Amino acid sequence: MLYHLLYPLHEWHVFFNVFRYITFRTIYAVITAGLLVYFLMPPFINYMKKRQFGQVIREIGPDHQHKAGTPTMGGLVIIGAVVVTVLLWGNLKNLYLWLCLGVLVVFGFIGFLDDWRKVTRKKNLGLTGKQKLLLQGLVAALFLYLALKYGTFDTRLAVPFFKNFRPDLGLLYFPFTVLVIVGSSNAVNLTDGLDGLAIGPFVVVALVYMLFVYLAGHAKLAAYLHLPYVPGAGELSVFCGALVGAGLGFLWYNAYPAEIFMGDVGSLSLGASLGALAVISKQELLLVLAGGVFVAEAVSVMLQVAFFKLTGGRRIFLMAPLHHHFEKKGWPEPKIIVRFWIIASFLGLIAVSTLKLR
């Protein structure tokens, strides 16, 4: 909105020319989203307390019963802040911007349905796993259809560390992309089990993709770095900036001990947004590296379930997801959180280093 209102004024005064630059608008998207969440979250927390919409804690696993009743669904504020920020600072003629906003909002709605059933029934019973997967798969498929029909990228796959190796998946690209978006959404959801555990790595991955979407949308830089060129993808830097700012604003209240949880409305939507960014920037496989913490959490659950069924009740981990395994080993919650943040930061740096390690 500001871009469309103020940039045309550059003919009147050179100052307004700054609204042309993606980097300028991205910086202020970070600040805007961060401030929105910072100021809107306290009244939201108070509202949720009055309505007694608090987190329901499972009785199995590590003892977190002291967190029962902590307000949840903070993801609603995150989503609202991102949407408002993108509408303010983004180029609203950009297709990819609307697609990513659509993924954020619709996956958030799926998470909201799940959260709402939990807080109103006062039991840890939301949507079934099959219901969530079906809804997520349909949304991801619609996203891919629109991106391929109206966008300008193909079905070839970029492989980190290899500059000229781009296998064409053909029709397999469709289920692969759905897997990326749905898998990313649920991986972030599985990670969101301790105070600040999910939002820290999320901010790191969003920063990584802030760089990659900008480069993908810049013809000369993409050619120089041997990246797939996706016209218009650079505008998603503003979207990434809004995600980073909103994530940092949320972390202010979600840091240990948490005053608010993001809920499925937050984790499912944020995870799906990362998947959508990975697809549009043609850096799908990079998400496995940059989001290694999320991948490890999801894989730990799959391995645990598979091994349990195959061996008739034996376990690989003391408890899954992975962060609960370390809790069972006696690690204090803050130590697990910070160490996962450190690992996420190193993985983010390695992901960025692939720009030159080709």
Image (spheres, rainbow, N blue to C red):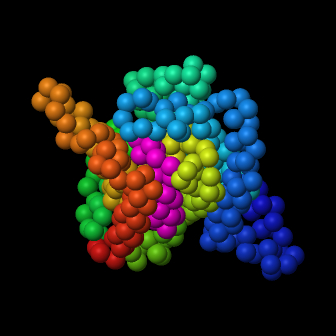
Can you say whether 115 is above or below 328 in the image?
above
Rendering coords of residue 327 (x, y %): 35, 47
Residue shown at 59%/59% (left/top)?
A: 248
Residue at image location 24% in from the left, 33% down from the top: 305
What count of labels does the image hold? 0
Does the magenta-highlighted stretch encompass residue 171?
A: no
For the N terminus, the quadrant is: bottom right
Q: Is residue 189 rendered magenta in the image?
A: yes
Picture coordinates of residue 307 (x, y %)?
Answer: 17, 34
Direction from residue 114 to residue 6 in the image, left or right = right
343 horizontally vs 264: left or right? left
Q: Position of residue 156 (x, y in %)?
A: 33, 54
Of residues 319 and 94, the one nearer the viewer is 319
- In this orientation, does residue 93 appear? no
Depth check: give the residue in front, 60 or 207: 60
Q: In what quadrant of the picture does the C terminus appear?
A: bottom left
Q: Quadrant of residue 44?
A: top right
| Dominant SS type (magenta) | helix
- Magenta extent: 188-212
Occupied quadrant, residue 224 = bottom left
Look at 14% across and 26% down and name the residue there.
Answer: 312
Where on the picture, by quarter, is residue 316?
top left
Q: Going by the picture, which residue comes out furthest to the left?
A: 311
| 20 over 101 or under it: above or below | below
Taking the image as shown, residue 19 lies to the left or right of residue 300, namely right
Front one among 65 and 222: 65
Position of 108 relative to 345 (above/below): above
Q: Residue furthest top?
A: 121
The answer, for residue 46, to whether it is visible in the render is yes
Q: Residue at x 59, y 26 (%)?
A: 119
Residue 141: image location, x then y, percent: 44, 36
